[in-house]
Image (spheres, rainbow, N blue to C red):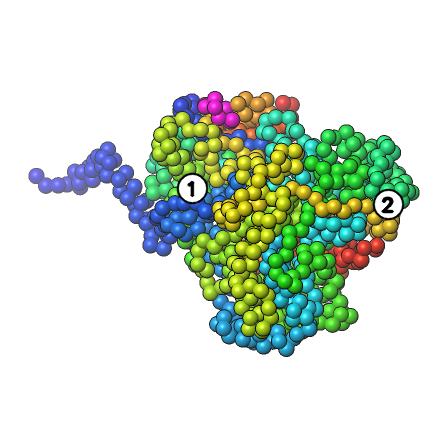
């Protein structure tokens, strides 16, 4: 019997149908899906014993303690250290990046020397020889810029530069510098510290306290504790500022006010407090009262800011009736605010009797220096870098012969970016200690890469905003990934080569001396079972077991101290009278109000590569950043949602797309900072615009401080 | 949607207090590295990038000055009655394990994306590209989560590997791994949130905080009327936020 066509087709069809009733097709499908996913170029995960070690974040300005997960001894990821008072288990997106940033494509892999338009790698020995030679020739005119607001390495750098003959020691602009100026003008001493943990009503004037202001992770922990999930809030937060930013989004009330009017608002609230009988024994009270009553009545404030009198009366009532009110002032973009608004905000704390009280503001003492000839933090913060560089650019200030740049990126992170770059170009010899190839490093003659947090010993002393003195260590948990060194050690080696005596042989010795000094300080303790805010609230401070402090600090605990320097804070009414005027609101001007977020990094880190994913597409799309304005402003300007516009101010211009966002006050255009890098890597370079370039530096009347938190801008 | 939810003696769930979320992105950043999601240079293209945890910005749609905003972190909702499971032709995703976590078996996934289309919460991501880490950064991969190639769908697993670790730790200390202490197992996003906006635990365990939180009058679930019976709850004192949780008619 032959196989005819009909039988053959039947066999094939039957076979096919029959196969469907067997596991064969499903097994094949399963195998196909497995083997088409088993490619050699897909990375394999590491294997090994998991353990955890602790350190402190130096990339994130909030200074969180970190708990690092390791596999077979290699760091894998960073989480918040629950035992650290500035973290308590929380971590910012930036601090989370501490481990993977070790392998950032933007890292400087070895010492590099400028060669034409690019760089060529050199050895550390060559670099030291060249630097010793050049700095020796520049003696008497060496300047330094530091972006590390908390490290003891500043002592080494300032002593080294001082002994070479300093042309200036400058910190990158920060909220800390503005507050230090304000405290000084008020006749006070010490660093302002804010006790959020014990406060029950917090008035926030401008400061983005949950993003860029001070110890923002700790601030959020304190906020979160006073808001148990599902229960009635135990605290009241009021935000005053030009946009409902990330801080204002969770506050109980947002009062729209231009950045330039923050001082007026503060004095407007003072008017209501004074009317309700508030008084103070602090110096200058009578004059302060006269200043406030003379120009900051409800109608004056309404005319200047548009805020209805009953709104500020309500705020004053909330503050006056609270058990532990606290007023915090800062810049909505983390920099560039004048000292006068901070003084005005601090005046409210004085009127409310909240200075050196639990839940109030503390004047925190500075930790003792250990390096001979080092500057104090107060002295370092007194330098005004934008004013200095502007003077250099304009030829009014002699350019230093050499500039050392540590953990700072002034070519990107300062206002009037073009002016600052011009000033930097005038400085004949520049050395950057940057870990990443940032905009400033790209301009330098020599780049001597600093090891990153997990590769070096370093420390963190009382970041601005902390309500208590705090000190913790970073500990190296792996060999440097690249040919990098700890800058503290580099400076000490260089000093020896140049016969400059800095007392210490290596940076570890410096840190040990610092810790030994702390161990002798009275009132200090290791925050373990008792936290500093509990001590501030009356709980006895535990004793410090002297010899174990280094061990405790290298185990991730923090040394803390609750206390205040004895100095009388006054109202500084003369400054307020000169600097703050409740004038008539300008007509039709559009004001640029930048904002910053930790997820876009700092000028020294660029955008951490994993954090780019957290940026919404209403902020960045492709290579364009968005500016935010409300529909009334957009209508007045004739711009539409999604349109590409050009922002012009101070002789510079930037492009942006328009995002209509109703939580920006009318007449304000809100722009994100942290974008528009021309250096770093594919995660930062060419992404959007740097709106800092639009901000002009203006000297604040009465204080002489450079300010730039807002600027009139043209949009077309 | 019809159907009934499977019941599990242990039901892991999350409660997110929207009124505490500042939208900082720490939860997203924590999730990316915890779960071996590669850095994405073109992350602004939200149709092609991956973020198991995503923070949405909500608004009340009013003009200034009556405008209000809130941030809504969105992990996988771990539906009791998951629409993604019933459409998967190869059983690469299922809800059959104690704990009620919707699984995703990458080697079994054929990349058909039916589940992506079915998920009403947009929690599922298709890998359009092979994952690439900058040179050396693969050393920071977590050993606890496998790396996925392109062509498969992935999603939040409530950091399931952490549950395994917590159970191991409980066994090692002589405790009952099926009755973990509150906080013994939390996801990476919950652990790292600086504001304490996220809570996690066994919804059925009276000793766990979330057991009570989900009974809060301000608690709600997303698109509750679909009948998905999700294991992620949200809390907000603001009515407009709660109303955005579902597609209400103007008259409702």
Image quadrant occupied by the N terminus of chain A: top left
- The lab-note entry on whether marks 1 and 2 share a chain reads no
Q: x, y (%) of residue A197?
A: 64, 36
Task: Identify which residue is drawn at 54% across, 34% down.
Answer: B198
Check the residue under mark 2 and report the chain it is in.
Answer: A
Classify residue A666 as left or right of residue A474: right
Residue under numbered circle 1: B154
Classify residue A54 as left or right of residue A214: left
Q: Is residue A481 magenta?
A: no
What predominant SS class does the magenta segment belong to? loop
Residue A318 higher or lower than A144, as above or below: above
Task: Identify which residue is drawn at 54% across, 39% down.
Answer: A528
Residue under numbered circle 2: A284
Q: Which residues are magenta?
A: B204-211
Task: Identify the residue at the far left of this view.
Answer: A1
Q: x, y (%) of residue A105?
A: 49, 60
> Which of A383/A161 is in front?
A161
Which of discs 1 and 2 lies nearer the camera? The answer is 2
């Amino acid at each position: 019997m032959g196989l005819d066509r009909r039988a053959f087709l039947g066999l094939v069809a039957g076979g096919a149908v029959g196969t469907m009733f067997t596991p064969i097709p499903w097994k094949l499908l399963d195998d196909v899906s497995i083997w088409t996913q088993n490619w050699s170029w897909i990375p394999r995960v590491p294997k090994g014993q998991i353990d955890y070690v602790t350190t402190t974040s130096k990339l994130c300005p909030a200074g969180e303690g970190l708990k690092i997960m390791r596999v077979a001894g290699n760091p894998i990821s960073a989480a918040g250290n629950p035992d650290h008072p500035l973290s308590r288990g929380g971590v910012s997106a930036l601090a989370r990046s501490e481990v993977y940033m070790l392998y950032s494509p933007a890292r400087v892999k070895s010492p590099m020397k400028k060669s034409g338009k690019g760089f060529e790698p050199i050895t550390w020995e060559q670099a030291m020889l060249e630097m010793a030679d050049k700095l020796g020739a520049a003696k008497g005119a060496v300047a330094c810029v530091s972006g590390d607001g908390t490290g003891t390495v500043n002592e080494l750098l300032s002593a080294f530069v001082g002994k070479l003959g300093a042309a200036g020691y400058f910190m990158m602009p920060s909220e800390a510098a503005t507050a230090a100026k304000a405290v000084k003008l008020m006749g006070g001493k010490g660093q302002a510290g804010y006790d959020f943990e014990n406060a029950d009503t917090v008035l926030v004037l401008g400061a983005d306290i949950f993003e860029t202001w001070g110890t923002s992770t700790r601030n959020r922990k304190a906020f979160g504790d006073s808001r148990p999930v599902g229960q009635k809030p135990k605290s009241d937060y009021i935000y005053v500022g030009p946009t409902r930013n990330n801080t204002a989004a969770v506050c109980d009330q947002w009062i729209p006010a231009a950045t330039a009017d923050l001082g007026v608002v503060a004095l407007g609230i003072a008017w209501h407090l004074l009317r309700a009988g508030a008084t103070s024994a602090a110096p200058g009270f009578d004059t302060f009262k006269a200043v406030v009553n003379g120009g900051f009545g409800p109608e004056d404030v309404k005319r200047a800011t548009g805020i209805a009198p009953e709104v500020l009366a309500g705020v004053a009532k909330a503050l006056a009736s609270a058990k532990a009110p606290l007023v915090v002032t800062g810049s909505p973009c983390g920099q560039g605010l004048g000292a006068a608004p901070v003084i005005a905000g601090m005046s409210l704390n004085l009127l409310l009797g909240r200075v050196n009280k639990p839940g109030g503001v503390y004047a925190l003492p500075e930790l003792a220096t250990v390096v001979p000839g080092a500057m104090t933090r107060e002295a370092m913060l007194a330098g005004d870098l934008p004013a200095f560089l502007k003077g250099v650019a304009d030829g009014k200030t002699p350019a230093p012969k050499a500039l050392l740049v540590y953990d700072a990126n002034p070519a990107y992170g300062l206002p009037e970016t073009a002016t600052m770059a011009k000033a930097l170009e005038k400085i004949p010899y520049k050395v950057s200690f940057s870990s990443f190839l940032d905009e400033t490093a790209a301009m330098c003659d020599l780049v001597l890469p600093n090891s990153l947090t997990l590769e070096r010993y370093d420390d963190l002393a009382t970041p601005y905003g902390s309500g208590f003195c705090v000190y913790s260590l970073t500990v190296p948990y792996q060999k440097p990934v690249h040919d990098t060194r700890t800058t503290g050690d580099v400076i000490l080696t260089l000093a020896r080569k140049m016969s400059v005596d800095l007392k210490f042989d290596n940076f570890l010795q410096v840190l040990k001396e610092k810790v030994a000094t702390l161990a002798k300080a009275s009132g200090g303790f290791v925050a373990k079972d008792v936290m500093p805010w509990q001590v501030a609230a009356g709980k006895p401070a535990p004793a410090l077991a002297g010899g174990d402090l280094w061990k405790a600090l290298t185990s991730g605990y923090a040394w803390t101290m609750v206390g205040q320097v004895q100095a009388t804070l006054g109202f500084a009414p003369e400054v307020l009278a000169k600097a703050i005027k409740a004038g008539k609101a300008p007509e039709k001007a559009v004001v640029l109000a930048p904002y910053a977020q930790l997820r876009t990094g700092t000028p020294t880190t660029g955008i951490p590569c994993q954090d780019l994913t957290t940026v919404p597409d209403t902020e960045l799309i492709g290579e364009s950043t968005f500016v935010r304005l409300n529909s009334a402003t957009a209508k007045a300007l004739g711009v539409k949602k999604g349109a590409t516009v050009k922002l012009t101010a101070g002789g510079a211009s930037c492009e942006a797309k328009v995002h209509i966002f109703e939580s920006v006050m009318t007449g304000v255009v809100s722009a994100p900072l942290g974008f528009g890098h021309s250096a770093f890597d594919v995660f930062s370079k060419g992404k959007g615009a740097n709106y800092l370039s639009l901000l002009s530096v203006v000297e604040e009347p009465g204080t002489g401080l450079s300010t730039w938190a807002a600027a009139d801008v043209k949009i077309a | 949607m019809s159907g009934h939810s499977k019941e599990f003696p242990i039901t892991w769930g999350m409660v997110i207090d929207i009124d505490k979320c500042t939208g900082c992105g720490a939860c997203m950043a924590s999730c990316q590295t915890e779960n071996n999601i590669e850095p994405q240079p073109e992350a602004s293209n939200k149709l092609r990038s991956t973020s198991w945890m995503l923070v949405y910005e909500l608004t009340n749609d009013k003009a200034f000055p009556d405008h209000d905003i809130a941030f809504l972190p969105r992990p996988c909702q771990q539906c009791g009655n998951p629409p993604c499971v019933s459409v998967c032709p190869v059983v690469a995703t299922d809800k059959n394990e104690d704990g009620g976590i919707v699984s995703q078996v990458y080697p079994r996934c054929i990349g058909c994306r039916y589940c992506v289309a079915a998920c009403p919460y947009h929690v599922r991501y298709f890998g359009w590209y092979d994952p690439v880490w900058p040179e050396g950064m693969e050393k920071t991969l977590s050993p606890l989560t496998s790396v996925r190639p392109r062509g498969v769908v992935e999603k939040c697993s409530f950091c399931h590997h952490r549950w395994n670790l917590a159970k191991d730790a409980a066994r090692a200390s002589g405790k009952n791994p099926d009755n973990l202490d509150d906080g013994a197992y939390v996801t990476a996003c919950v652990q790292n949130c600086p504001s304490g906006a996220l809570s996690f635990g066994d919804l059925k365990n009276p000793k766990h905080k979330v057991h009570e939180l989900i009974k809060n009058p301000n608690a709600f679930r997303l698109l509750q009327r679909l009948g998905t019976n999700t294991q992620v709850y949200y809390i907000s004192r603001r009515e407009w936020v709660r109303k955005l949780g579902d597609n209400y008619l103007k008259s409702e």
